[in-house]
Image (cartoon, coloured by chain):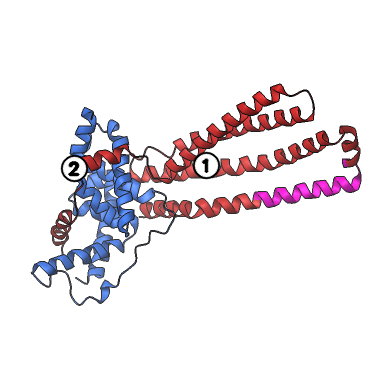
Chain colours: A red, B blue
Amino acid sequence: MEIEDLRNLWKRQATGFEPHDEAQLAAMIRRSSSGIVSRLKRSVWFELAFTIVAGIALLVYALTLPSGGLKWISIAIIITFFGYCVYYIKKLALLHKFDRGDSDINANLTRLIASLKSYLRFYRRSYTVLYPVYFILGLLFGALERNFDAFYARITQPSVAITLLGTALLLFVAGTWFTRWYLRKLYGNHLERLENLLRDLNQD
Amino acid sequence: MTRDEETFLNLIKAHQGLIHKVCIMYENDRERRNDLFQEIVLQLWKSFPGFRGDSKITTWMYRIALNTAISGYRKQSRDIPTEDLHEAHHNIGDHHDGAGNEEDLQRLQWAIRQLSEIERAMIMMALDEIPYEEIAETMGITQNNVRVRMNRIREKLRKLLGA
């Protein structure tokens, strides 16, 4: 069996499919990509738009409120929303790096691996920061709900403070572990697959 | 329809066999092949403004199509079931009738699917008579590396096809 025999066979399969006409092909280029990166981008755009709209609505509502606990809670949520907007924009910028598949396969795989790793790193770090933020917000809401002085006096009691710190630590460790597990489940196999492909491509 | 769209669609119409071959080699399921076909056409369209004709159109198409097929994220495993063609009682070239040729083609497709995704890309281009220089350029490796890999791939195919 020589390569020429295989080529002759190979050429024949070009006739073994139903060709698409111009209208079908034109419809294909007008569709949105079904690739995972495009779907992720669409979902992040949606979340960003939702956060902005909800943030503006909350701001308008907060401005009508008299000074007090509810107003401060609204402002704290608006600040969190702002943080989320920064997070979504950075996420979009990272997802944008996944595009441009017109380089050679080696360069493309190398770029994809680096992009995916930096995307996952950012995801992990964001959630690592987010858990303490939620915890502090929880404390703040607690302080506003009760009288601030009474709340302070209560949380500075050694037993309460230790329980609070222990819970915070536990939530932080569990949250970080869950984020790592979730990311590994979502993207771990894909990253491993890309690394194996690159290894295979570069073997002597 | 813009002039660019018209030029692009004519190109795809003329070379869609290449995209079909990539889809057949990288997806087993008919529906997923259609999805991959559409995705490749879309990626080609996105990259079309950057195509300046420095390389042959087929080389450019292979580069985009293979990048989409190989590195595209899939939720499910894309391992192609290895239907047991080992047990078939003939080798390629044993017969000369039409049905035999069809069977030979299926055996060849099966054998190529047993290769790694990288090897599949290389043999596909070689079978489409893309010169080693362009295969090296598409894969991003040296020509010498292509030569060595192609010898190994040929050897693997020989064993798989029992020829």
> Which residue is at a point 23% across and 28% down the rendered structure image?
B2
Task: Say left or right for A89 vs B56.
Answer: right
Specify the quadrant that holds the C terminus of chain A. bottom left
Specify the label residue A119 is tagged with.
1
Which stretch appears magenta?
Answer: A155-176
Q: Position of residue A176 (x, y in %)?
A: 65, 49
Secondary element under disc 2, as helix, strand or loop, is: helix
Q: Position of residue A86 (x, y in %)?
A: 58, 31
Q: Position of residue B150 (x, y in %)?
A: 25, 57
What's under tag 2, amino acid-wise? Lys
| Magenta segment, prevailing SS (helix, strand or loop) | helix
Relative to A43, is B98 above or below?
below
Chain of the residue displaying label 1: A
Residue B77 figure quarter: bottom left
Residue B160 covered by magenta stretch: no
Question: According to the image, label 2 marks what residue?
Answer: B13
Mark nearer the viewer, 1 or 2: 2
